[in-house]
Image: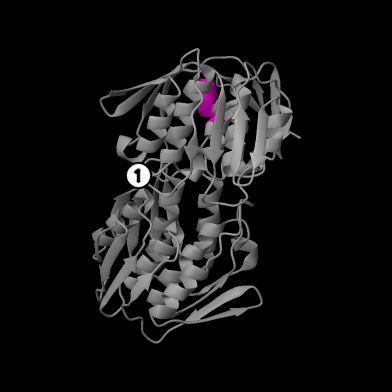
Amino acid sequence: MDKIIIQGGAPLNGEVTISGAKNAALPALSACLLTGGWHTLDNIPQLRDIWTIREILSNLGVVFEEHGQTLKVNSDNLNNHSAPYQLVKTMRASILALGPLLSRLGKARISLPGGCAIGARPIDLHLKGLSLLGADIRLEHGYVVASTNKLRGADIFFDISTVTGTENLMMAAVKAEGKTVLHNAAEEPEVVDLANMLNKMGARIKGAGTDTITITGVKELYPARYAIIPDRIEAGTFLTAAAITKGKVRIKGCSVDYIGAIIKKLLDSGMEIEEEGEALVAIGRDKIKPVDIKTMPFPGFPTDMQAQFMALMCIADGLSIIKETVFENRFMHVSELRRMGADIEISGGQALVRGKKNLSGAQVMATDLRASASLVLAGLAAEGQTEISRVYHLDRGYQGLDLKLSLLGSKIWREKY
């Protein structure tokens, strides 16, 4: 296994390009199950989660051709409807195969998913919605077993906003008979990106990006070429990296519309962010002001940026309060930040962070994807050397984060252990 070692204290300086969004690429790859022919997906990131979904789809009969950041996908010979536990266990997004398989084959058998240990993240809303569309759903020996003679449109109300639930039901409904309306749908940019791709394939979807999405079923879909949006969480991570190192970074390939909540909080902390054409220039300042945040579904502050922002607040000049409302178990990075000298107190669903002048390098362990990023950021700012183990979590969602930081002037490298 790899560990990442960081010699802290170097301000970042230079230019970085944001990779394609993991959470947009995964449903896009799943959508290729809906119809045969060669789909072409551009701006696909090189990540562990992408390799995992490719393994799952290959097991179903899908064929790939890779050309750098472009991936050609063909599901003409879809000859399997089962995704086994040994492939699914590492990634929750594998459940996104369920809706397309039901739509295309009328049956699916998917192992209950795994992934980062940041909360229960049940899939019951997916299953209730599919039942309303006319699927027969059973849970057997750790698998979701679904079948249908015909999917029909329905009014579906989500009790809570769910990104993968919204995406799964959109894909299931695109060829269902009649009209489907998703109420309290997720509004995240990744949902919009999937809807745009499906519409390019011939689907009729309106309202993506709002809380009400209407899908009018069509008889046929067609393969398409589509470019995945840049990763807004990677963009937010590099903005925060500039702030925590008091550096200056030009960030290419990020949409201001998708990271408005992150930008606002970073501006409140005292950093400068300037638009420069299609890029953002992030300038960190010596004094970091304390800022309170509360995680919310889009367009609120994203839960996937909570850990990184907490690392920044660890060296802010004062007390900040960080409230986590999306996942019940997403403060596991706190104990590791404390090992680096952070003063953080957990009280229910919130963390009280008393900023200190300095953090100290230490041996720490990553517990999930975004916790990994927070420890990297803390290590960039800390005095001395930080060693981060279990960085395979990081590789699930960031393409070459350590390499990109190295090119910006950070003293960061990998070693085997």
Q: Quadrant of the C terminus?
A: top right
| Region rendered in magenta | 401-407
Q: Residue sitting at 65 percent across and 42 percent down?
A: 347
| Residue 254 makes an appearance in the image | yes
Residue 404 in magenta stretch: yes
Q: Residues within 10 Å of mark 1 (few under 14, many from 20)?
A: many
Spot occupied by residue 313 in the image (x, y as percentages of width and height): 55, 27
The residue depicted at 59 percent of the width and 68 percent of the height is 112
Residue indicated by mark 1: 229
Would residue 77 be visible to someone looking at this image?
A: no
- Most prominent secondary structure in the magenta stretch? helix
- Where in the figure is residue 385, as x and y percent of width and height? 70, 20
Q: Is residue 166 left or right of residue 214?
A: right
* Residue 303, magenta (yes or no): no
User: On the rendered image, what quadrant is the N terminus found in?
Assistant: top right
Query: Residue at position x 29%, y 55% from top?
Result: 210
Instruction: In the displayed orientation, state which residue is furthest to the top.
Output: 286
- Closest to the observer, 227 or 119: 119
Q: Residue 158, percent across and down?
A: 41, 66
Determine the image quadrant of residue 331.
Answer: top right
In depth, the one of 152 and 37 nearer the eye is 152
Name the residue type under label 1.
Ile
